[in-house]
Amino acid sequence: MTKHIVIGAGISGIGAAHFAAQQGIATVVLERSERVGGCMHTHPFASLDGFWIEAGGHSCFNSYGTLLRIMEQRNLLDLITAKQKVNYLLWHQGRRRSIVSALHFLELALSLPKLRRLDKAQSSVKEYYEQLLGAKNYRDLFAPAFRSVVCQPADNFPALAMFRKKPRRKDILRSFTLANGLNALPQAIAQQPNIEVRTEQLIDQIERTATGYAVHSNGQRIDTETLTLAVPPDVAAELVSTAAPEIAAILQRIGMVEIDTFMLAVEQQQLQLKPFAGLISVDGPFLSAVSRDFLPDDRYRGFAFHFPGGKYSFADKQAAACAALSLNPEQIAASAEVRNRLPSLSKDHFAVIESLDQALNGLPLAITGNWFLGVSIEDCLTRSEQEHKRLFAT
């Protein structure tokens, strides 16, 4: 009998394991892939001496209080690395443009006084920000910008899930990364007493038992008193379809989208562009692009272009990225692509989560992920800590 099992080794699952480990609770983490980190995915190019690009999350902030507390507990604050200040650009009608070129200043000035009358809690992103910023500003700049943040159309996202105000720590850099990429964080957090991570684990079935749950993984049965699911909602729904069908029905109401990320590295002298943070795509085939210019390398520059999943061929994605960077394919030093799956939230999302929490009440089952409070690293960890407190009554 195991005290606690976590399924999923993204930052949500590793965070859940950390909170348990800090309380002296031995935790086994089961991960389907061969790596820890989930959407925190730093991709190194072996052919380029390990030069890396972030394929997923690419920034941490001094408002990430839960993350910073975990880093303090694990003596990881010394890993914090400053990010060079660079700005985003727009990609519109086949050209790179400045952000301000898309602003309608008069409309903005006339719209902002509405702020006090708007109810963010009851609004979708489109409903709230179109009134706050003006219809033209929303159409030409902010809708594409929000789409870049969540890598999918954001019109129907709950406005509260887009940005949550959090207190900032003045003793920490406002925005930071790690010298070897953000994936080093979940890896370091996982390497502590009371946490055992098992990768390449295929979960066949979850049963409810008199003492908790039985998890069938890779042909073996593991009994546990408490269980945390840190996987996408559709995966969680399938896993608990027998053990908790009413919870599965709620989870099925939360949508998912697939994102193809095309990464490329190029030698410095091959690229004439000044350093920039990334591209907000207004009308291009890609949703957004993020550069590695925030942490300059002596030889290479790197970029990650996010596309709708399954819509474009490798050649199409390469051509779109080259057009955006004024490159020829022959100038690419190395490239790779990965597929991520992200939650697609709707306006009634928090009502769905409220129903889920009511169904979970009293069960030795926790559910966490990047689809509760928002999609940021801090949102993931906040939910994981909330569920830990409920599960273990701390």
Image (cartoon, helix red, strand yellow):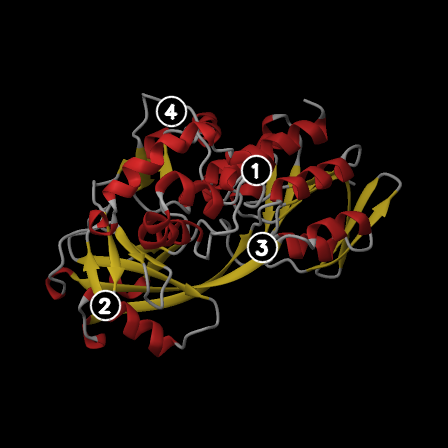
For the residues carrying marks 1 and 3, which lies nearer the camera in this image? 1
Label 2 with label 3: CB-CB less than 8 Å = no
Q: Which of marks 1 and 3 is nearer the N terminus?
A: 1
Q: Earlier in the sequence, mark 1 or mark 4?
A: 1
Q: Is mark 1 on a helix, strand or loop?
A: helix
In this image, 153 relative to 17: left or right? Answer: left
The residue sitting at 85% across, 38% down in the picture is 211
The residue sitting at 35% across, 68% down in the picture is 285
Residue 33: x percent and y percent? 55, 59
Residue at which label 3 appears: 199
Residue at which label 1 appears: 122
Q: Earlier in the sequence, mark 2 or mark 3?
A: 2
Distance Cα–Cα, label 4 vs label 2? 38 Å
Q: Is mark 2 on a helix, strand or loop?
A: loop
Residue at which label 2 appears: 94
The residue sitting at 16% across, 57% down in the picture is 299
Residue at which label 4 appears: 168
Residue 327: x percent and y percent? 18, 70
Q: Earlier in the sequence, mark 4 or mark 3?
A: 4
Q: Which of marks 4 and 2 is nearer the N terminus?
A: 2
**Residue closest to the eye, 354 or 124:** 124
For the residues carrying marks 2 and 3, which lies nearer the camera in this image? 2
